[in-house]
Image: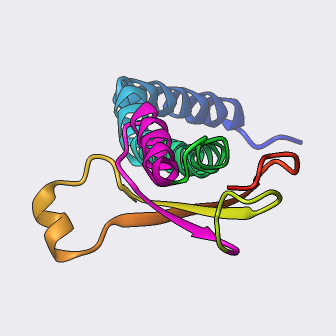
Amino acid sequence: MPAPGGGRRRRWFLSITRRRVRRGQSEERGSAVIEFVFLTIVVLIPLIYLVLTVGRIQAGTYAVTQAAREAGRAFVTSQVADLAPARAQAAADIAFADFGFSGRLDLECDGSPCLRPEGRISSRAEIRVPLPLVPDFARAVVPLEFPVSATSVSTVDRFRAAP
């Protein structure tokens, strides 16, 4: 048998619970926007910076790969041996400039003369990719650059006339 007055207690408890729930909802109003803004700052901004950094390093990788390959091609297709290093440097400079970098090019021959038939020319391009959005005063204290390099070996045409 139910206790006397049990129905009143139950209604009283339910009315208090409903009031608390309503009060809790009204106190929470607007906090989702604050949480969203906070999470955006904490998560999205570092993610955007990571994407910018990886993109810049990838651009540097493309730049050195293209510079090394084009420098080797320009060297081995030169008709005059004395002009070959200048042609290679010009080709590398164009490749670096295409991606917004300035870099260094090293050329090596496997024998003498360099432009003999089936001679191999090794060209190595190198740049230093700075981290994006880092101020200059921080770069002076901590090295914030990634070195990126690529090497390409080009072969002089087998049927080229010997110099």
Is residue 50 in view?
A: no
Q: Is residue 119 magenta?
A: no
Image: magenta residue range: 82-111
Whether residue 112 sits left or right of residue 67 in the image: it is right
Q: Residue at point 41% right, 42% down?
A: 93
Quarter of the C terminus within the rendering: bottom right
In the rendered view, would you say 111 is above or below 11?
below
Q: Nearer the viewer, residue 35 or 29?
A: 35
In the rendered image, residue 45, in percent from the top left (x then y), is placed at 39, 42
Location of residue 153 in the rendering, given as x and y in whole percent from the top left corner: 72, 60
Q: Is residue 103 left or right of residue 109?
A: left
Percent across and percent down for residue 131 are 35, 55
85 is within the stretch colored magenta: yes
Quarter holding the N terminus?
top right
Question: Could you tell me which residue is drawn at 59 percent across and 49 percent down?
Answer: 75
| Residue beneath the point at 67% across and 62% down | 121
| Res 105 seen here | yes
Residue 23 drawn at (x, y percent): 40, 28
